[in-house]
């Protein structure tokens, strides 16, 4: 996974991936609606495939609007991570955006990272 950001075409939304030990962190910046959802999907697919047991944090502290399609993608990614023996946690999500399908959440990036380090497979 490179440090390059994935950008939505013609928009300010982006996903900046980075690695913290065995955890892949995806920093979400901007709104993820309409065509920008594809940026999120690509980034999540890459993050989930990076390790045999995926440990992923979506840091939504700087995210704007997250539409229903993006929430469905996040829920599916969470299920995939669990089925592979890993976890996906959404950190600092905007209050109106509640992921579907039992996706774990934490108030801060630090809490999410600490949780994954504490319980890593």
Image (spheres, rainbow, N blue to C red):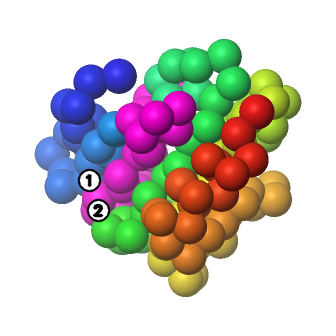
Residue 3: image quadrant is: top left
Q: Position of residue 28 (x, y in %)?
A: 36, 55
Q: Is residue 111 visible?
A: yes
> Is 65 left, or right, of 67 in this rendering?
left
Q: Nearer the viewer, residue 83 or 12?
A: 83
Tell me where the magenta segment starts and ends, as one range.
19-45
Label 1 crowd bin: few (<14), some (14–19), many (20+), radius 10 Å = many
Label 2 crowd bin: few (<14), some (14–19), many (20+), radius 10 Å = some
Asked whether the residues under the numbered discs 2 and 1 touch, taking CB atoms below 8 Å apart as contact, a structural biologist would say yes
Q: Which mark is residue 13?
A: 1
What kind of element bears circle 2? strand
| Residue placed furthest toward the front | 118
Q: Position of residue 34 (x, y in %)?
A: 42, 51
Q: Which residue is mark 2?
A: 30
> Is 106 left, or right, of 83 in this rendering?
left
Q: Is residue 78 visible?
A: no
Q: Nearer the viewer, residue 38 or 80?
A: 80
Q: Nearer the viewer, residue 33 or 47?
A: 47
Quadrant for the C terminus, please.
Answer: top right
Count of residue discs: 2
Q: Earlier in the sequence, mark 2 or mark 1?
A: 1
Q: Position of residue 112 (x, y in %)?
A: 57, 60
Cα distance, mark 2 to mark 1?
A: 4 Å
Residue 27 lies within the magenta run: yes
Residue shown at the point (20%, 31%) measured from the top left: 4
Q: Position of residue 6 (x, y in %)?
A: 27, 35
Residue shown at the point (23%, 37%) measured from the top left: 5
Residue shown at the point (66%, 66%) measured from the top left: 105
């Amino acid at each position: 996974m490179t440090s390059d950001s994935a950008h939505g075409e013609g928009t300010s939304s982006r996903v900046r991936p980075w690695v913290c030990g065995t955890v892949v962190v995806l920093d979400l910046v901007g709104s993820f609606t309409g065509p920008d959802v594809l940026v999120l999907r690509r980034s999540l697919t890459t993050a989930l495939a990076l390790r045999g047991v995926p440990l992923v944090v979506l840091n939504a502290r700087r995210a704007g609007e997250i539409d229903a399609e993006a929430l469905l993608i996040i829920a599916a990614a969470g299920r995939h991570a669990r089925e592979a023996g890993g976890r996906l946690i959404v950190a600092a999500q905007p209050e109106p955006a509640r992921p579907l399908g039992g996706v774990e959440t934490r108030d801060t990036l630090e809490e999410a990272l600490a949780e994954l380090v504490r319980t890593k497979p």
